[in-house]
Amino acid sequence: MSTYSKQDIRKIRRKRARLKKKLKCRFSPGGEIPRPVYVDYKDVRTLRQLIDRENRIMPRRRTGTSAIFQRAVRRAVLRARFIGLLPYIGED
């Protein structure tokens, strides 16, 4: 079994960091946040991309959504579920 030195470990971590894709917020493409912040609850296609198979809202670190828009996404998903556009639980 080979052991890595500290320098080798640093090099491997740097390579992995470079290969990792930088996530960007899909709601503010220019980086600026429009006011008022709103995510349309009737846009089911976009909301489905932000929930997983079990219909749980995916975290920011997986989707790349900014904190302000993540709160708006949560509100939109809850509204869509209440109206019946999205299910509360996943299908088996």
Image (cartoon, rainbow, N blue to C red):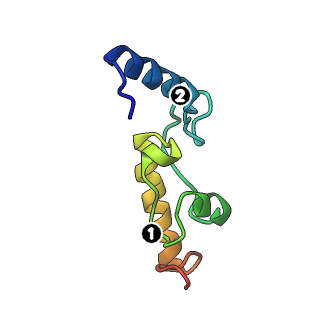
Amino acid type at circle 2 is Glu
- Left or right? Give the position of 2 relative to 23: left
Q: Is residue 41 above or below residue 82?
A: above
Amino acid type at circle 1 is Leu
User: In terms of sequence position, does the residue under pointer 2 or pointer 1 come before the other?
Assistant: 2
What residue sits 45% from the left and 61% below the top? Answer: 57
- Count of marks overlaid on the render: 2
Secondary structure beneath dot 2 equals loop
Q: Is residue 34 above or below residue 3?
A: below
Q: CA distance from mark 2 to mark 1?
A: 25 Å
Tell me residue 75's x, y (percent). Answer: 43, 61
Name the residue at the front extreme: 1
What residue sits 35% from the left and 27% below the top? Answer: 3
Q: Quadrant of the N terminus?
A: top left
Packing grade of label 1 (10 A; few <14, some 14-19, many >=20) is some
- What mark, if any, has residue 32 been given in the picture? 2
- What mark, if any, has residue 78 been given in the picture? 1
Quadrant of residue 44 within the rendered picture:
bottom right
